[in-house]
Amino acid sequence: MSRRPVPQPAVDRMVPFAGHAVVVGVVPGQAPLVVRTAASLAGAVGAGRLHAAYADTSRYVVEEHADGTVTHAALDPDAADDAWEAARDALRVQVGAALADEDVAWELSYLAGRPDRALTHLARAVDAAVIVVGTRTPGTGARLRELVDGSVAAHLAHHQHRPVLTVPLAVVDWKELRTPWEG
């Protein structure tokens, strides 16, 4: 069995910014700065639509659809299978509040599985020019999660051909930054 080569970024694979969708990764409780940045970019390039998307890691993809949506199910077969709907509705309210003053058409996609794969699938389906994600907020828990799971932005940048815009959510003063060996 021979492996097909992974398509690489190239000039002929570029999706022009003008007139193409923007995909933005959202998470519950996220600062509005990420969605507002994506909306600003969408407005600046005349994007037809802003696609906000959340990938629920407690669910898995049953089927991917051509429009970027997915059919999904709970990883835990004993979990209530409709609990995700409340999370989706809360995210819709969160994104709506962040975009209340913005003049941009948007929709929310509730996806499942690995965030980088879910965002890539959606971006491909809607022919997005760029994917916008936020950084993790600093803290021991965030550093540990990033060590174990990796950075969504880094995974995206290395595994698909669209540009990734990473929005900083907190800045660490370089003077305060310590490497692990500095104690």
Image: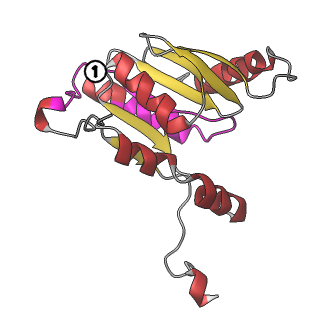
Helix, strand or loop status at disc 1 = loop
Q: Is residue 58 above or below residue 148?
A: above
- What residue sits right under mark 1 in the picture? 20
Where residue 91 sits in the image (x, y, percent)? 66, 24
Q: Is residue 80 above or below residue 154?
A: above
Q: Is residue 38 above or below residue 146?
A: above
Where residue 12 sits in the image (x, y, percent)? 12, 31
Scheme of colours in the image? secondary structure
Check if residue 30 falls in the magenta segment: yes
Q: Quadrant of the N terminus?
A: top left
- State which quadrant residue 83 falls in: top right
Crowd rating for badge 1 (residues with CA inside 10 Å; few <14, some 14–19, many 20+): many
Q: Quadrant of the C terminus?
A: bottom right
Q: Nearer the viewer, residue 111 or 136?
A: 111
Residue drawn at (46%, 21%), measured in percent from left and top? 51
Residue drawn at (22%, 27%), measured in percent from left and top? 15
User: Relative to residue 29, is residue 180 drawn left or right?
Assistant: left
Segment colored magenta: 13-41
Where residue 7 sits in the image (x, y, percent)? 24, 35
Check if residue 46 falls in the magenta segment: no
User: Relative to residue 123, is residue 141 drawn left or right?
Assistant: right
Q: Nearer the viewer, residue 46 or 109?
A: 109
One can see residue 102 in this view: no
- State which quadrant residue 127 falls in: top left
Callout 1, which amino acid? His
Q: Nearer the viewer, residue 82 or 177?
A: 82
Where residue 112 sits in the image (x, y, percent)? 61, 26
Residue drawn at (59%, 22%), measured in percent from left and top? 61
One can see residue 72 in this view: yes
